[in-house]
Amino acid sequence: MRNNTLSECYKLFAVRTQTSVQNGRRNYSSSSQEPKPFKEVPGLSSLPIIGSAHHFLPKIGSIGPNLNAFDLMDTLHKRFGPIVKMKGVFGRADMVFLFEPEYVEQVFRAQEANPIRPGLKSLEYFRENTQKSTADGLYGLTTVQGEKWREFRSKVNPALLKLKLVKVYAPGLDEVSKDAVNRLKRLKDDQAYLEKNFNLEMTRWSLESVALMALGSRIGCLDDTFTEDHPGRKLMQFTKDMVDTALELELLAGIWKYFAIPTFKKMMNTYQTQWDICATYIEKAKKKINERGYDIPDEEKSIVERLLAIDERVAVIMATEMLAAGIDTVSFTATTLLYHLATHPDKQEKLRQEIRSDNPHKRYLRACLKESLRLRVVVPSNLRRTDRDHVVGGYHIPKGVDVVSPNEYLSRLEKYYPKANEFIPERWLTDKSDPIYYGNAPQMITLPFGFGIRSCIGRRISELEIETFMKRLFDEFKVTWEGPPINIVNKMLVTYAEPFYFKFENAK
């Protein structure tokens, strides 16, 4: 595992976990005893201003800067028990980590009626200030809360959730997947290139897939003429900049709101570039639809056409959010599944047989994806910021606390999943009489797409992208991993770092 800086180690859970909140009255547990005060919740000691951050300093910190997300959760759980407090840093909200699923369910369900999901402060600033005249009060799903969020979500739900995705996009996504696999066929013997650039190739496939749906057309990411000045390159750079700098900006929000530090200026320019590129492609899509000269059945309309029918600004906003949320997350998830199958050749061969069969349902492929998401997910925790007082585990949890459910960690505990650290897709296909059956675990354990009404709106889209790609790839290749374990880096999202030791051989 690569070392993480202090900020990466601490901020991983302070910022980039999925969040939501609701308004309401005080919530009590079933205990008749007076709850213990919040200050008595076990956890890391704190100092003024820096909170618990000193525990992550090299040499002198009780934890140090080098733990990955899973090991950090394991350390907190074993040291402090089922409920753990971490004081907020630089004025950010305090955090409470819940290691019992019933505690998680108590808080998450209580906060479900009207959840709020605090977004990136830098993006909020951009939309509320720099982009105010352009968006004209429309801020998307990631930066607004309460009724504004509910109103926007109700507008876009029919376009993204009621769409017959397979009918509309399966042929196009299959063409993208074929092109990506053909690139790998040309590159597979250049091991040195793939070891260094496999993540780039996966990002090119992911962006091309997301663009097909978010922008209404393919944009040429898999072409040999994909030069440095191509708009797709700028979109890829946007995602990289966002992942690399967003956490820093979250911690320094109290500074850049008054003094425009260089990182802040760079991110504002990056947001603007992404908006301009998306607006250009949406305008092209609109022109193409208008030139068609006839209407088509509603079930055959694309996401872009459905969003344009609402408002062109809505189409551009959703394009920016789909690209921001969908490029690295889909690439990471696909790479993770590929890694698990490359290191489990028996599972890979079973999948290949299913892919080549006449069975249209592909249940084993979906089981492989679910199992891969159980073991490793791009956002390893879910979070709710309390908007009321709670009593959890005998402790008073006040309003304004970030309650964290470390779902990836919980999903790898033996008491919930027998053979928890093994890749066993069959646990998603067996029945409850089998000890490994996934349904024997509490419902709140494995939540790779979040929970409730603010769960990932692009779930069906991302699953279709990944499944389509895997069918093409494993029909063509036998994939192995010939090296030490893959390198994980904790940033705003969990990412992988070179080298990549995938080896591709003809499977036919």
Image (cartoon, helix red, strand yellow):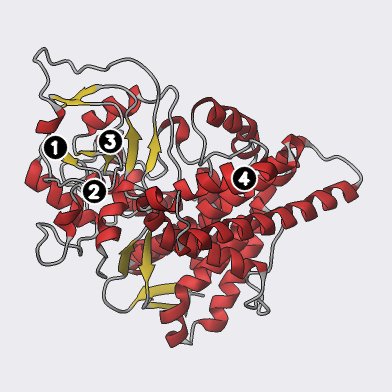
Residue of label 1:
82
Identify which amino acid the numbered label 4 is placed on.
Met
What is the x, y in percent for residue 376? 32, 55
* 69, 437: nearer the viewer: 69
Callout in the foreground (3, 1):
3
Q: For the residue marked with disc 1, what is the amino acid?
A: Pro
Q: Position of residue 214 (x, y in %)?
A: 64, 51
- Most foreground residue, 312 or 136: 136
Tag 3, which secondary structure? strand
Number of residues whose C-alpha sits closer than 10 Å to that of mark 3, classed few (under 14), some (14–19) or many (20 or more): many
Spatial CA distance of label 1 from label 4 is 39 Å
Determine the CA span between mark 2 and mark 1: 13 Å
CA distance for labels 3 and 1? 13 Å
Pointer 4 with pointer 2, Cβ within 8 A: no
Disc 3 marks which residue?
A: 403
Instruction: List the residue tagged with mark 2.
Output: 409
Q: Quadrant of residue 10?
A: bottom left
- Mark 2 and mark 3 lie on one chain; the one further toward the N terminus is 3
Q: Is residue 49 left or right of residue 39?
A: right
Which of marks 1 and 2 precedes in the sequence?
1
Of residue 503 and residue 73, the one placed in the foreground of this image is 73
